[in-house]
Amino acid sequence: MKDVTIIGAGVVGCAIARELSRYDLDVAVFEKEADVCEGTSKANSGIVHSGYDAKPGTLKARFNVEGNRLIHELSKELDFPFKENGSLILALEEEGRKGLEELLERGNKNGVPGLRIVEKEELKEMEPNVSENAVCALYAPTGGIVCPFNMTYAFAENAADNGVSFVFEGVTGIEKLKDETGEVFYRITAGKETVDTRTVVNAAGVYADVFHNMVCEKKIHITPVKGQYCLMDKTAGGYVKHTLFQLPTKSGKGILVTPTVHGNLMYGPTADEAGDCEDTSTTAEGLDTVLSKASLSVEDLPRKTITSFAGLRAREDGRDFIIGEADDAPGFFDAAGIESPGLTAAPAIGVHLAKLIAAKLNAPEKKDFDPVRKGIPSIALASDEERAELIKKDPLYAKVVCRCELVTEGEIRDAIERTLGATTVDGVKRRTRAGMGRCQTGFCLARTIPILAELLGKSTDEIEKSGHGSYYIDGEIKDTL
């Protein structure tokens, strides 16, 4: 009998797992993909929202502002990339000023610090390349950018180091049962196995309604909404310093232009209902929309695209987060309908649900909980002294595998051998950035695969891109020098 079983190893599920690992509980996380961070969490804007947009009094507003504050602290404690670059919401015509004033009032009610409206002259000083049509902007200094992959990995690794088990098997069924004392518990089916658990956390993203509706009479409905993005080369990375939004609409926050924490420039997303929960395809029409609407925010929009991608957000019909214990399913806790600002809200959702579950199960806090996690050293970001020290400890930190992003074999081996290490090429890519540069794995792929094969005890033709039979090659790679 498990104490807690979490369905979904995205950023929300992993944040909850990390917070639950503070308590003396037997916790397991089930994930249908081959790695954590394979769903919505791997394909989003990487924006840490300040909290001006959500309607006051909603769960989105509450957990956005709390999550923003926590990320500032957690980025240091868990060693993941974060930068407080600030956000600017642009009014591209004078009529938009009223909309900015409404957002300012809303943000003040939500408790967002430092909000103010900047006029055109100051705006041009802050962002020289902003559109000439921009008449003013709402400035949100606590807005930021984060690496969504490393944030999720950080939560997961720290949770695992503190005793949480991760099972990469998809949940296919949940039964609500009672024991001999009349206490409710749940029987989860995953593959050929069943697990009994005292409580369940439903953090299944676009599938959260499926699991909720298996045990609850009050049904919920989630629509997967696709967002398409264009990622620019790092030579365009400094074109803007802040994250530039246009005034939000009913569909969302619109097309943004933002630097990434890794030095690229990114545009997106669209917001179109997807055909199904696995449709992450991009379209020519969608990407054209991204580029044309992004060009409204800045002059002479850089178009040095190195890749495009799409992600799905889980939009519940009520348009707010669903967080907490279900009314008619004791011990079943939802973290459902987590669309934007879900990435920002994740740490706060984790703290909130962990406290609720620990109180329900009368679980004491551990005395030996370790809140600190160290990330993979980066040769690209290290100083000369730091590089020399790394290479002294392990000469493989001098052997470059990915030229575009300057990633070495030492970093790749660390990514594979660490807690919850990479087992696929995409897992290495997201943990180290090997393959995320201009050539998009053209140079490093044939070097990454043999390292994975060696450390996993497999042949090179058994190595997958992202699991589930996504094999790259037929036969052995003989020489990668």
Image: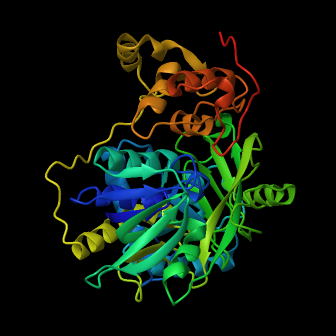
Query: Which residue is farthest left?
Result: 367
Q: In front: 187, or 89? A: 187
Q: Relative to residue 81, is residue 201 depicted above or below? A: below
**Is 424 placed left or right of 196 in the picture?**
right
Colour pattern of the rendering: rainbow
Q: Where does residue 383 sit, x and y in percent of width and height? A: 41, 22
| Residue drawn at point x = 72 percent, y = 64 percent | 270
Query: Residue lying furthest right in this view?
Result: 284
What x and y, as percent, mark residue 102? Answer: 53, 82
Which of the pair 301/443 is nearer the observer?
Answer: 443
Q: Is residue 210 above or below residue 292?
A: below
Report the front residue among 48 and 244: 48
Q: Residue at x 77, y 48 (%)?
A: 300
Q: Position of residue 291 (x, y in %)?
A: 78, 55
Res 403 visible: no
Q: Nearer the viewer, residue 155 or 17?
A: 17
Extreme residue in the front direction: 180
Q: Quadrant of residue 288?
A: bottom right
Q: Quadrant of the N terminus?
A: bottom left
Q: Quadrant of the C terminus?
A: top right
